[in-house]
Amino acid sequence: MPSFDIVSEVNEVEVKNAVEQANKEVGNRFDFKGSDARIEQAEKVLTVYADDEFKLDQVKEVLVAKLVKRNVDVRCLDEGKIDKVSGNKVKQAVTVKVGIESELAKKIVRLIKDSKLKVQASIQGDTVRVTGPKRDNLQEAIALVRKSIDDFPLQYQNFRD
C-alpha cells in the first residue's frame, strides 16, 4: 500500500555552518567592535550573547540571514526569554525544533480525517505516516497539508508505491 511520512527536520551541518559564519560576521562588523556579541551552539540550542537588547536583536538578524542563505527554514527556531547575565549583558536561548510535536501531529491527523480523502494518517513518534490505496490520494493529502499548515516547516519523505 502506498505511503509517505510527514516529518520536520533541520540540516544540523548547515545550522552549524550558519552559526560559524554569523560569528565571523559579528566579529568583523564595526558596530560590534569591543562588544561581547557571539552565538554559541550546543546540540539543538543556540545561545545568543550581546551587550544589550538592541545588539542582541542585531546578532539574531545576522544569524537568521545566514540560516536563510543556507536554506534552513527559520520557522523551526523557537526563541526563549531574554536573560540578564552580568551588568548590562544579555543572553537568549534559541531552540532549533526538530520533529513534529504531538499537538501538531494530532492536528494533521484530524485535518486528513476531516477531509474525507481515502487515506489513513497515524502518528509514529515524531512523524505522521499517511497511507492510501492510490498514489493520487496521497498527493491530494500532501497538497491539503501544505495548504493548511504554513506556520511550521514540514517535509514529505519516504514516499513508497
Image (cartoon, rainbow, N blue to C red):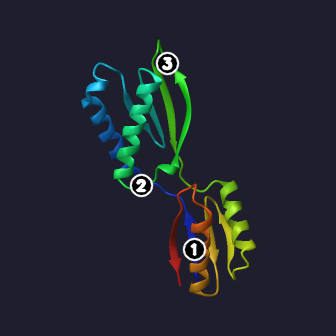
Q: Nearer the viewer, residue 98 or 56?
A: 56
Q: Earlier in the sequence, mark 1 or mark 3?
A: 3
The local secondary structure at tag 2 comes to loop
Find residue 96 and report its horizontal and vertical position in percent: 50, 45
Separation of marks 3 and 2 at Cα, in angstroms? 30 Å
The local secondary structure at tag 1 comes to helix
Of marks 1 and 3, the one in the foreground: 1
Q: Residues within 10 Å of mark 2 (few under 14, many from 20)?
A: few
Viewer can see residue 16: no
Q: Residues within 10 Å of mark 3 (few under 14, many from 20)?
A: few
Q: Residue at coordinates 67% horizontally, 64% vertically from top-left?
A: 108
Amino acid at circle 1: Ala
Q: Is residue 130 above or below residue 13?
A: below
Q: On the image, which quarter does residue 26 sit in? A: top left
Q: Which residue is mark 1?
A: 143
Q: Which residue is mark 3?
A: 85
Q: Nearer the viewer, residue 134 or 129?
A: 134
